Amino acid sequence: MPTKSYLEAIREGMRDEMRRDERVMILGEDVGAKGGVFGTTEGLQAEFGEWRVMDSPLAESCIVGVCIGAALYGMRPIAEIQFQDFILPAVDQIVSEAAKMRYRSNNDWGVPMVLRAPFGGGVHGALYHSQSLEAMFCGVPGLKVVVPSTPYDAKGLLISAMRDPDPVLYFEHKRAYRSIKGEVPDEEYTVPLGSAAVMREGRDIAIFSFGMVVHMALEAAERIAADGFECEVVDLRSLRPLDRAAIVSSARKCGKVMVAQEANLAVSIASEVAAIVAEECFEYLDAPVMRIGGPEIPAMPFAHALEDFYLVTPDKLEAALRTLAAY
Amino acid sequence: MVVARSHAVTRENVDADTLRTLYRHMLRSRVLDERMWVLNRQGRAPFWISGIGHEAIQVAVGMNMEPGRDWLAPYYRDLALTLVLGMTPRDHILSVLAKADDPNSGGRQMPAHYGSRAHNIISTGSPVTTQLLHAAGIALAMKMRGEDSVCVTSIGEGSTSGGDFHEALNFAATHKLAVVFVVENNGYAISVPVEKQMATPNVADRALAYGIPGVSVDGNDVIACYRTARDAVQRARSGLGPTLLEAKLHRLTSHSSDDDQRRYRSADDLAAERAHDCLPHFRSMLEDLGILAPGDAERLRLELVAEVDEATAFAEQAADPLAESALLHVYAEDD
Ligand SMILES: Cc1ncc(C[n+]2csc(CCOP(=O)(O)OP(=O)(O)O)c2C)c(N)n1
Ligand SMILES: [Mg+2]
């Protein structure tokens, strides 16, 4: 199987689906001739033309609102938000419109739209090019939210998202674009929305995470495996809906649970996973659930030392895992 | 900016049948709208938000659209427009009584939150101004498919202060999309007068900034509305791009059934507006021209009242939504 980067997998997913389904179109800032600020849509305008791969005005509500309209008319739009940090002007269109369209019309209308946005830090992006804002959307019924951590999932989840009849937010970790590579079939395939993936099996501590943190968790798990502690690393992949069954199964099996994410912890995915574990695995637990994430400061600062302070790293995870193992 | 006005008897290209149909649509909406107020005041309908005073522009626009081909992204005052496009008094009374078979939302949304796929009317929520971008997206899709359909969208003047107004006009103008932006300027956004909303005398003046035509029309003059709407729809259909069409009119009721405009407007003002009601004005004109014979208007009114009576009786017996149905249709898989 050929090896591809996370970014190539995303591009291939869009390209293949655009070849297969002429309703698929992309609207976003700089997605055309430039191919996006990260190169994600490189070559797509040359292949599919200026209408299907359209440079939008610099207006996020416009990008999402226009895609909603196009979806209502029968297109399968992909709205690209250049950085997830700049999604906020579009939140009304996402939460008030896309998420509620099917419900409020009693199933008369739906919005089959994918919204792609790069998120996450560790690239010296400072406060406004580093955030992980997924929690803002994961409590919104009517939306689906996915975050791939591997190139394989990046392509498979994206194809599923594009074929889904409802709005899917597809958040891609910008640090994964070129640093994460993996096997990706040339053929089309899908990864179902709503399912988690066990990345490493273990029996002592279940680690739930998503995005880049999955890779750090895998590294930390390897390190403590040397001392005889076997971690089960679960990539949540789908943040709404969460794969409740997978969470419960790994938590019960291990009896100790860590949830690790990049964002600050208050009212977050880690909070939700911890709540599920508390509700469904209480009698199986051998230790309190441990949540690892960013500090409660507004966003990730620029300077190297400050950014490092914010980020979850394999070292920090390893230390926390040792504490949990010793409990 | 062009101010369109019909001269005393310039009805060129608007024939007698069309005039009669315009009148019938306006009166039908008025009769239904008045019934909604009655249902509200009787305590049978918790809420109503009215289109009384807005009928002329809505009917004029609707009659220039092609049902089944053109699309509408409406706002909550567009009762008349939805009726012209084929929705019925039954549909809307089902909605005001929040019945399961309400085609707008199955009783999920407040009344006057219009939407019907069968009529190419997209579902509208409560946040104002968002629908303009949907109209731009619909027209983008129409253009990508090489179709010459038109998407009409409408909005109040107060809501044009919101950012989506700018984003939608800019996008539609940039790509010459077939959108007609209709601004129903009644001078108030709930209690806030237009002078506190914008510094320009006409919303239509802003068209210049987008490189598209802007027309401000007397929204109580249905013939002027009709001709202006016809031009705007034709312009869109022939690929020339959007028009910003503003109709200056009066909200002849309080903002909604929960508002009492006497608290923020003088009695003199309100009386003066009543005198400009588009409907009696149009009726006398048609009678003067012999297009309506004596007695015609009254006969028509009785016929329309009977239709609304029937619709009310029908809707009152219709089933309420089942409580558990609240869980349905969050996602497509629920079906
Ligand atoms: C984004 C948003 N803010 C506030 C409101 C509450 N609201 C509903 S209608 C309205 C006034 C709208 O005035 P205008 O646009 O002039 O339309 P009109 O009601 O006069 O036809 C307000 C403030 C809302 N629905 N949406
Ligand atoms: Mg107003």
Image (cartoon, coloured by chain):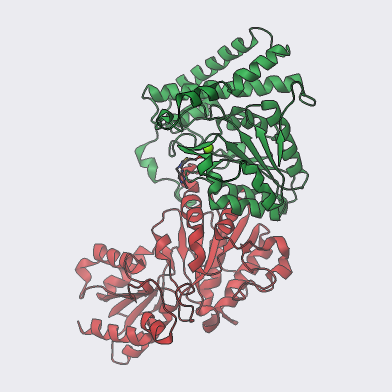
Chain colours: A red, B green
Picture coordinates of residue A156 (x, y %)?
54, 69
**Residue A256 falls in which quadrant of the image?**
bottom left
Give the camera-side residue of A105 and B279: B279
Query: Quick check: B284 above or below B150?
Result: above
Picture coordinates of residue B143 (x, y %)?
72, 51
Say which quadrant the N terminus of chain A sits in: bottom right
The answer to whether residue B85 is visible is: no
Picture residue at 56% right of the left edge, 12% below the top: B302
Picture residue at 69% right of the left edge, 19% below the top: B20
Give the camera-side residue of A225 and A39: A39
Give the camera-side residue of B176 and B315: B176
* Residue lying farthest to the top in this orientation: B294
* Residue lying farthest to the bottom in this orientation: A226
**Residue B323 falls in which quadrant of the image?**
top left
Picture residue at 32% right of the left edge, 81% below the top: A231
Say which quadrant the C terminus of chain A sits in: bottom left
**Residue A237 falls in which quadrant of the image?**
bottom left
Picture coordinates of residue B152 (x, y %)?
64, 41
Using residue B91 as the reference point, say whether residue A300 is left or right of it.
left
Number of numbered markers: 0
Using residue A322 as the reference point, say whether residue A237 is left or right of it.
right
Picture coordinates of residue B69 (x, y %)?
69, 39
Picture residue at 66% right of the left edge, 60% below the top: A21
The answer to whether residue B304 is visible is: yes
Query: Quick check: A94 above or below A209?
Result: above
